[in-house]
Amino acid sequence: MKMMSVLKQLRALIRILMAAFAMLVILQQVTLAASTQQVISNMAIGEYSEEGSSVVQVSRSNLVQTTILPVYSVNLTANQTKTVVAGQKVYFNHTLTNTGNDVDQYTFALTNNTGDSYDLSNLAVFLDKDNDGVPDGAAITSYPLSAGESVGLIVSVTVPGTATLNQTGLVSLNITSSNSASGTKLNVDTTTVTNQSALVVRKKFSQTTAANGDVLTVRVDYQNISSIATGVVTLTDTLDSSLVYQSNSGENWNGVTVNPSEGSNDPTGINYSVASNVVTATLSSVAANSSGYIEFKVKVNKSIAGAVNNTVNAQYDHDNNTSTVNISDLSNLAVVNIAPIYAVKINGSATDVSNSTIVVATQAVQGGELTFNNYVWNTGNTTDRFNLTLTANTFPTGSQIEFYRADGVTPLLDSNADGIPDTGFISANTPFPIVVKVRLPSNYAVTTETTFEVSPQAQSIADVSKKSIIKDQGSLRATTTARLVDIANSPENNGVGNGNVDNAGAAWKTLTTTTTVSAVAGGQVVFPLSVTHTGIATEYLLSANAATDFTRLTLPNGVNNVRFYTAQNAKDCSVLGTEIGKTRYLNDGESQLVCAVVAVSAQTTTTTTPIYFRAFSSSLVSTNNSSNPSQDLIKNAITIQSMNAVAQVELMPSARGQVAPLGTVVYRHILKNNTDREFAGNYSFLITNDQNAFQSTLFYDVNANGVFDSGDFNIRYLTDLPNGKLAAYEQVNLLLQVKNLAANNLTQANNTQVNLINVSTGQVVASIIDVTSVNQTQLKLTKLQARDFNCDGTADEAYSANAMTIGQQDNGQGQCVFYKVTLTNSSATSLEKAFNFRDMTPAYTVLFQAPTCTACSATTAPNVGAPGTLSGTLSRVAANQSYDFIFGVRYVGK
């Protein structure tokens, strides 16, 4: 028996700890949600093909952002009336709810009303955190609530002993918001004196938090606070549909079993019954100055997180006279919270959440694209959003991997300012389709069909411990034939001879660097490598790996990227030349000096890691690989010395566009400080183009209009900004101007990388890559926005690329935003093939006004009031012409 008692105590303790933990999770999540601003980010896409080509070109517009303004509103419930005895302390139960979308602080004031019979004394407000109708802790004068959060309040007053029959006293509870919230902020409580009986009824659950399927005990307490017995008392508890009554499970009256069946033999003094989830207890009388209770059990039938509320209605004969009207009263509001559960599953099925099958894409050729259809399932019980990252990536260096929305065209963006693309909010038990695209490098090929894979990860933003991965797998078709090659260190001349990979297992050469995330001075090492060819003229692809098995390309731990360059003087790597992915064509016995630039990422500890370099022929395959191998490897190593991290600064977004020969394109970017401290110091913007025919310059957008103007000035350092720094949470607009300097480089593509680096350590703190392709027709896609404050269908301001804020209309609905997507052909050559505008309603919005495009032959859009994909088709794009695609959305978030 003693052991059973100990076990019961342990179980009770575990239940208490679990409840406390669940409530802590709720509070933490509420706080997190309140402190994170909602930002609507949006980008339009254009699709077209050049004359004579079947290759689909993709152009991205600039990014436009709208920040949701804080909405402050509150609701206080409800006015209360109590029948009381002179000299009695009285509790009035209220519920305060923050119905806005941001945290707010509320101050309480209690005042006696005028025009009543007497003033109440000992006025005080208490918290009722467990909603059992009894004050918790000391009296309070203010309390904060996060968005959507509620708390129970108890107003405590004392009735004067001199009050007489039917006299009334009124007290007002006023709520003052620190942010001038709208809503119900006043409740008036009334006491009416009786010289007969007075009953108090309270209700509580055995747990304040529960999970679906839990069985809870409900306790209803009643007390006659007068010196006169009551007549008949009827207590009615209409249970919420989320609570299922558990028959014959120990229901009792003051410890004595009662029967829930109608008409059954209950103990003398009570008639207890349950019908259609309504519990009724009729007491023949409640003696003077006495109390009692009723207990029964309910099972939680609610899978979605949230509060379940219930009250008990009391009707009693206060004067033992059936000809007079009974007194009616309500208990406190009893609450049990269904705790949020955060969980996620990412897979390849839109209908089966348990599916874990590997997603396999259609085979690609050299330089081709692999497409994977994945689905992020919110398997929790509350709305959540999920960060998307890539893990276990074995695709060759230089592969571009991006997340897209369901249309496969619109990039997924960051909705919570942590710099990671995410899904936006997903309701519980709902799948969210995403598309993962992998574009393989055009300079990479294999001699046998090779399978690569990457595992996208979805991670809950509300609970980072909850994450899931899916394996996406695709293969690269083999390119047949290769030649003999020797790769060695230069000028050390070690590793000479095909197959002479390492120095008796050790690295031939070890270099040291500090941590960084890009190939910049102080955060990189440069390995001069000599590639020598024997046989018929051919070229060799260059790559790096963590191991000798190059069929699974994985960079060594701590290595962010490896890039290969020519030596500008062809003798050493003191000055880098053009970036390359392969050697030039080498004649028999000819060599080429290659500079392998290795950039390392942030490390928490200093480490030494091996790195293998390979020269490999993609054009020819040997028929006798033992005597005429198609590749050669060499083993070197890097010692990475750890550096401290810096503040979180975000440079976004990476863009894509195109120019005509000798043309210029300007990309708009946002540099944002996401922290609560200023970002300043010796930081520079390093700009690199991977093609010689391009020149790129970074400008500060003085008037933040997203257009290059005469007043915009060139910046190379953070100190070039107007204030010489980024203040806390500040963001500025930057313009990257990319010029094509060649007249005959059609179809060439250039990657422009902009890195913001710490000059002292070489560490990169923010980075973007803009891709510019050269086409005969120069098309530019821009996106502007304008607000329609009252959603009357007319923009209330000029269109702009600037960030803006929206909130609620007077009617409580969200305000509206118009988007104008403009296609401009700035060349003298028309595009004689179709151009497609592609866009989607941003997160937290629905379509408010269907798209207009006067030159479009067709448009598509979701129904008004629904989210979805929009498109417009131009049959041709005339030279030196612009075309507009305009639509409106309404904000429907909180």
Image (cartoon, rainbow, N blue to C red):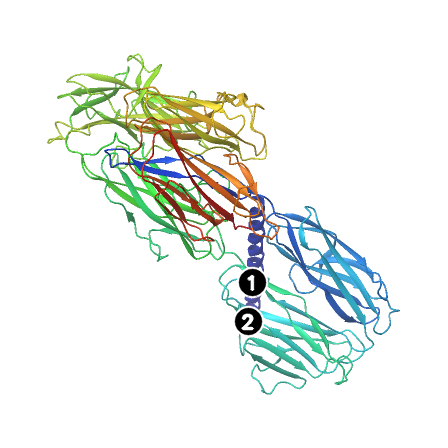
Q: Earlier in the sequence, mark 2 or mark 1?
A: 1
Give x and y (percent) for residue 888: 48, 45
Please tell me in which quadrant of the rendered image residue 190 appears.
bottom right
Q: Amino acid at mark 2?
A: Val
Give x and y (percent) for residue 343: 45, 53
The reply to whether the C-beta atoms of the residues labelled 2 and 1 are less than 8 Å apart is: no
Give x and y (percent) for residue 182: 67, 51
Front residue (pair 867, 547): 867
Tell whether 757 sits left or right of 724. left
Q: Secondary structure at mark 2?
A: strand
For the point 33% across and 48% down, the residue is: 373
Extreme left residue here? 623
Front residue (pair 792, 597): 792
Q: Which residue is mark 2?
A: 298
- Crowd tier of the residue under label 2, counting other residues whose Cα lies within 10 Å: few below 14, some 14–19, many 20 or above: many
Q: Is residue 565 visible?
A: yes
**What's the CA distance linking mark 2 and mark 1?**
23 Å
Q: Quadrant of the N terminus?
A: bottom right
For the point 55% across and 64% down, the residue is: 11
Q: Which residue is mark 1?
A: 10
- Relative to 280, say whether 447 is above or below: above
Front residue (pair 542, 419): 419
Q: Nearer the viewer, mark 2 or mark 1?
A: 2
Q: Amino acid at mark 1?
A: Leu
Q: Which mark is residue 463?
A: none
Tell whether 847 sits left or right of 120. left
- Crowd tier of the residue under label 1, counting other residues whose Cα lies within 10 Å: few below 14, some 14–19, many 20 or above: few
